[in-house]
């Protein structure tokens, strides 16, 4: 129980640090409509969405989620213009966004601008975060020029 509380506390601290250190846009959606309004608002914001299953009982999956969230947090703190959100696929209030976006496995990451994006999924958190870093310059340029990234 203490280990689980420490992980929860670490996640809260990570989100607070991301928000305070970089002025990043951290979205904590209460329901699907809130996040969907951001994604379908015909804007050119860059969104980095992390899909996780908070109900996972497997400690390896929980550790994988936490590791990936930490790596993405580093990216977000270096890029204050990114809108970041962690979406729990086990939360019934977020099922609509999960279904509309088509999330089929976790952890998964979606990097998106103006309705166009790239999906990353798997268990290699290093590779996933490095691929986000590879794609990010194109997506940021697309955002600043109000163009599609591809």
Image (cartoon, rainbow, N blue to C red):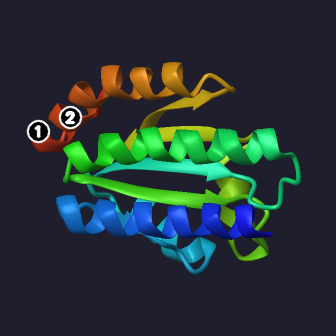
- Residue 145, labelled with which disc? 1
Q: Residue furthest left?
A: 145
The quarter holding residue 92 reads bottom right
User: Residue visible at 29% across and 30% down?
Assistant: 136
Instruction: Characterize the local packing of mark 2: few (<14), some (14-19) or many (20 or more) Cα atoms within 10 angstroms.
Output: some
Label 2: which residue? 142
- Residue 38, labelled with which disc? none
CA–CA distance between discs 1 and 2?
5 Å
Q: Nearer the viewer, residue 41 or 79?
A: 79
Position of residue 44 measured from the top left corner of the image (x, y, whole percent): 25, 50
Label 1–label 2 contact, CB within 8 A = yes
Q: Is residue 73 left or right of residue 127?
A: left
Task: Tell me if residue 40 can be seen.
Answer: no
Q: Is residue 145 above or below residue 44?
A: above
Q: Is residue 46 left or right of residue 126?
A: left
Position of residue 4 measured from the top left corner of the image (x, y, whole percent): 73, 64
The quarter holding residue 32 reads bottom right
User: Residue visible at 72% across and 41% down?
Assistant: 106
Position of residue 138 measured from the top left corner of the image (x, y, whole percent): 24, 26
User: Residue visible at 87% across and 46% down?
Assistant: 58
Q: Nearer the viewer, residue 13 or 33?
A: 13
Quadrant containing the N terminus is: bottom right
Q: Residue furthest right?
A: 57
Q: Is residue 5 above or below residue 143?
A: below
Instruction: Characterize the local packing of mark 1: few (<14), some (14-19) or many (20 or more) Cα atoms within 10 angstroms.
Output: few
Q: Is residue 65 above or below residue 23?
A: above
Task: Tell me if residue 127 can be seen.
Answer: yes
Query: Regarding mark 2 in the picture, which secondary structure is present there?
Result: helix
Q: Nearer the viewer, residue 56 or 142?
A: 56
Q: Is residue 140 above or below residue 87?
A: above
């Amino acid at each position: 129980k203490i280990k689980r509380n420490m992980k929860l506390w670490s996640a809260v601290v990570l989100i607070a640090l991301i928000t305070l250190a970089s002025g990043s846009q951290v979205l904590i959606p209460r329901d699907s409509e809130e996040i969907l309004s951001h994604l379908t608002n015909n804007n050119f914001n860059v969104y980095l969405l992390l899909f996780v299953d908070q109900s996972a009982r497997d400690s390896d999956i929980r550790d994988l989620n936490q590791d990936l969230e930490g790596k993405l947090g580093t990216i977000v703190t270096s890029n204050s213009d990114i809108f970041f959100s962690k979406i729990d696929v086990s939360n019934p209030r977020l099922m609509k966004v999960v279904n509309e976006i088509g999330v089929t496995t976790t952890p998964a990451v979606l990097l998106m601008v103006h309705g166009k994006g790239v999906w990353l999924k798997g268990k290699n958190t290093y590779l996933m975060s490095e691929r986000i870093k590879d794609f990010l310059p194109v997506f940021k340029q697309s955002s600043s020029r109000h163009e599609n990234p591809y």
